[in-house]
Amino acid sequence: MPAVAARPRLRVGIVKMASCDGCQLTLLDLEDELLALASRFEIVEFPEASSLRSAGPYDVLLVEGSISTPDQAAEIVELRRQAKLLVTIGACASYGGIQALRNWSSHDVFRAAVYAHPEYVESLATATPVSEHVKVDAELHGCPISPEQLREVLVSVAVGRRPQIREESVCLECKRLGTVCVMVARGMPCLGPVTQSGCGALCPTFGRGCYGCFGPREQANAASLARTFELEGREGEEVSRLFAGFTGWAGPFRSVIGDFGGPPGMTSGATSPITATTATTATTEGAGDAG
Amino acid sequence: MQGDDGGTLVADAPGIDHEFKVGYITRVEGEGSLSLRVRDGAVVEARLRIFEAPRYFERLVVGRTGDEVVDIVARICGICPIAYQMTAVHAFEDLYGIEIDPSVRALRRLLYCGEYIQSHALHVYLLHAPDYLGYPSALAMAVDHRAVVEQGLALKRTGNQLIAALGGRPVHPISVRVGGFSKAPRRSDLDGVRAALDAAVEQSLATVRLVATWDPPALEHPQPLVALRHEAEYPYNDGRIVSTDGLDLAPGAWREAFEEHHLEGSNALHARTHDGRVYLLGPTARIALAADRLHPLAAEALEATGLRDAIRTNIHRSIVARAVELLHACAEARDIIDGYRPPSEPKVAFTPRAGVAAWSTEAPRGLLHHRYEVDEQGHVTHAQIVPPTSQNQGAIEADLAAFAPAVLGLPHAEATHQLEMLIRAYDPCISCATHFLDLRIQDERSGKGT
């Protein structure tokens, strides 16, 4: 494709906030394509992999991790200014991640539980997704993200089209794979009906219920699924714990967790009010014009 | 924090104090910075500061079951999630008195082999090799050394393939459960990766030979070494905690020898021995304490390098230790698959009970200790997680204090490079060690080192 090759390489940055580095690692896990991608993209900022640094500007900025410290809250605003396209990668950046479960609890209690001198620890009262701080052009879901979806976003940006990512539930992936429904056949609680696909229905295929790491699908009726779990004899915390995982802060799941008494182990005295705002789960499809 | 990565040498009080800073240490997992205070050529203070945001995992697991803990603690580290899953799962199984099927035990080892292959291949080729060959990154290195980078990527892919065959995906695999696996693979599920492992054994043997030819900076600063040691196996999931000082403890008894300290004048938690000494974990320690348990192919390759003693005293040689372990993991994985028979049941049933669930395993970066207090329902009431990097930080700082005076006369960028290279030789995983903030070396230790 000489027309594409003739374009200047796009300046890409990969940065992290509060996270495990697993989603950035997924970029390095595109082993076969990595060297080929490097011919289309100039990776100007990727401190985990390169000593060369750049403060911007970026044609595309991939952001991993939730906003959890005052420094990060300031930094993301500056990074947004430097980025033509800002794409969040993974459950932490897109939904707040597992650490957002502390948003139901007292920040002070959490700090004191881990640190002998909590006053030295700089963190915000809540861990929140990037979209609660700045405009996000596209979100990749998953804990971790799917390498295929990451490749799709990079390729679509390179050729200037919209990324094509399916909007459907994990159930449909199970059906296509012929995986027997673990909820129907084995009575296991499963978040598949309300969870965005993308993982390949891994958990049901491996004989366990989906734990929702790709987050709620569009218009997910999580409350209805929660009532189903309730009718099967679970109550209160036994329902909330099913939703209180890596995407528990996403609107529909957050509502259920709140309705069923909060996540397990929560403390009293949350520092900020817990409200289930409208889900901010912009689908990747249709977002991220690569102009 | 953004910007040019060159170090800055700032004269605070002319002629007396200098401060040398590396604002953001690159090619490590996570976010950290280094600062040294230098007086008349001597390092009077070294600070390895971790500004990775705290995520409060030890509190997040409160109220959760063993199976939930296995899923949650994986997210401490995207590079070594299996180490976290394994340490937690063994801790709960030990408390609940669960006897796992021998085939399940073999699968756990196989899964750990996968993590060693991908983690060590990542570090040796993508993070560490550019230091020796003189490039800012593996991608830049690939322009001149494409075959080397491709060999590293191929090894990494094999590790990922192995993890995915057992746990669905390379990062945060999903099949590890208290009592076994949610599903055990059929022998045929492993055919693809078995074929790749033949090539991986050759590639990792070539890796040992390659990295053994790279000349490291001189450094002789031996620390006491600590690792697991098992009666028959190279240490992954099981064994006793031993040291070059003669320590010998059960894997759950970490607290009998070590503790997390809060140093006066610092807001840091350090892991130390009870008598306050630093120690070193990881490939260097394992090779020193368990080389006789290596796979014969890896043992032979290690001997051929003639570097066994050098590995022990110069941390820069850790790249050789890592390469030997890469070969071990590939060769053992191949043997495990060849001898594999699926378990009759992938998972055994169990009843939770109250008590303390504590265990240690060997993460790629060294001994990882977990301790959970559990109530009658099997819900965690208190947790302590001690990652290898937080235990190694004392040793890293001691080596920095010893090494820094020799490089501080160099041009700034070169001095920064040399100090970063030393830090990278430890393969620190700062994401794991987040809650060990803002470390400093006190004057007396830098005095000893210089």
Image (spheres, coloured by chain):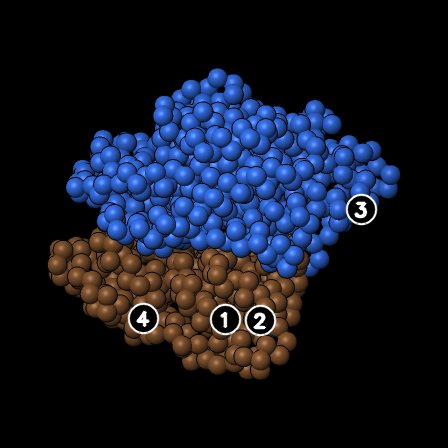
Chain colours: A brown, B blue
Residue B146, percent from left and from top: 59, 56
Find residue B411 and name its label: 3
Disc 4 marks which residue?
A217
Q: Quadrant of residue A2?
A: bottom right
Disc nearest the viewer among 2 and 1: 2
Circles 2 and 1 on the same chain: yes
Circles 4 and 1 on the same chain: yes
Gap between marks 3 and 2 measured at Cα: 34 Å
Q: Is residue B448 left or right of residue B82?
A: right
Residue sitting farthest toward the top: B246
Gap between marks 4 and 1 measured at Cα: 22 Å
Disc 2 marks which residue?
A40
Circles 3 and 2 on the same chain: no
Residue A230, percent from left and from top: 16, 59
Circles 2 and 4 on the same chain: yes
Disc 1 marks which residue?
A154
Whether the residues at callouts 2 and 1 have beta carbons within 8 Å, the answer is: yes
Gap between marks 4 and 3 measured at Cα: 54 Å
Q: Earlier in the sequence, mark 2 or mark 4?
A: 2
| Residue at 84% over, 37% down | B16
